[in-house]
Image (cartoon, rainbow, N blue to C red):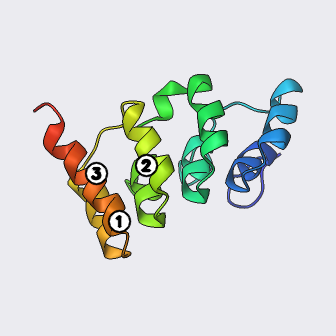
């Protein structure tokens, strides 16, 4: 079942940072880590918005394609973590291979998260040219 925004209980558990709930739903076949709501938000993206590092670590191996998957607004998990100032989550995403972008750094800077912005800009500078 989905709510009016297309969220399933699993996605709501991710947004709320409820790892135990997500594990239980998945064990009962109701936890597809690659599912999206109407705004194309994944569980990983929602965990990153909420700053839930432990949950993000659990989700990524279940749906590795979600690492750089943008929502309907074009915002990636890294960008959301930066915007919310979740430095540990952003650092972990970068270590997992998330693509660092100036847009992510600008989001962090615009919200006053200078250290996060600095970390992402350093990663942008170190990233190989594509």
Residue 120 drawn above or below residue 99: below
Image coordinates for residue 54, horizontal then vertical, percent? 65, 41
Decide: few, some or many residues near mark 1? Use Cα within 10 Å; few <14, some 14-19, many ≥20. Answer: many
Q: Which residue is mark 3?
A: 120
Looking at this rendering, what residue extends furthest in the front direction?
Answer: 115
Q: Is residue 75 above or below residue 110?
A: above
Instruction: Measuring from the top left, give residue 66's x and y in whole percent.
Output: 49, 34
Q: Are marks 2 and 3 in contact (CB under 8 Å)?
A: yes
Give the CA separation, mark 1 to mark 3: 9 Å
Label 2: state its secondary structure: helix
Decide if residue 71 is in sight here: no
Q: What whole-number distance in Å separates the C-alpha atoms at marks 2 and 3?
A: 8 Å
Marks 2 and 1 in Cβ contact (< 8 Å): yes
Image point 81% across, 47% down: which residue? 9
Decide if residue 31 is on the left or right side of residue 111.
right
**Dot 2 corresponds to which residue?**
90
The answer to whether residue 112 is above or below residue 44 is: below
Q: Determine which quarter of the picture holds residue 19.
A: top right
Kindly report the distance in space between the C-alpha atoms of the residues bearing marks 2 and 1.
Answer: 10 Å
**In the rendered image, which residue does mark 1 sit on?**
108
Residues at circles 1 and 3 in contact by the CB criterion of under 8 Å: yes
Q: Is residue 104 visible?
A: yes
Q: Secondary structure at mark 1?
A: helix
């Amino acid at each position: 079942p989905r709510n009016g925004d297309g969220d399933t209980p699993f996605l709501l558990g991710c947004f709320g940072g409820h790892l135990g709930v997500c594990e239980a739903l998945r064990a009962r076949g109701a936890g597809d880590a690659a599912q999206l709501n109407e705004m194309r938000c994944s569980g990983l993206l929602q965990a990153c918005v909420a700053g839930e590092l432990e949950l993000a670590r659990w989700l990524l191996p279940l749906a590795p394609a979600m690492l750089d998957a943008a929502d309907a607004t074009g915002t990636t998990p890294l960008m959301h973590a930066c915007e919310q100032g979740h430095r540990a989550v952003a650092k972990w995403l970068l270590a997992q291979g998330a693509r660092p972008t100036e847009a992510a750094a600008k989001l962090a800077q615009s919200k006053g998260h200078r250290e996060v912005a600095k970390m992402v800009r350093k990663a942008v500078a170190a990233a190989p040219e594509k």
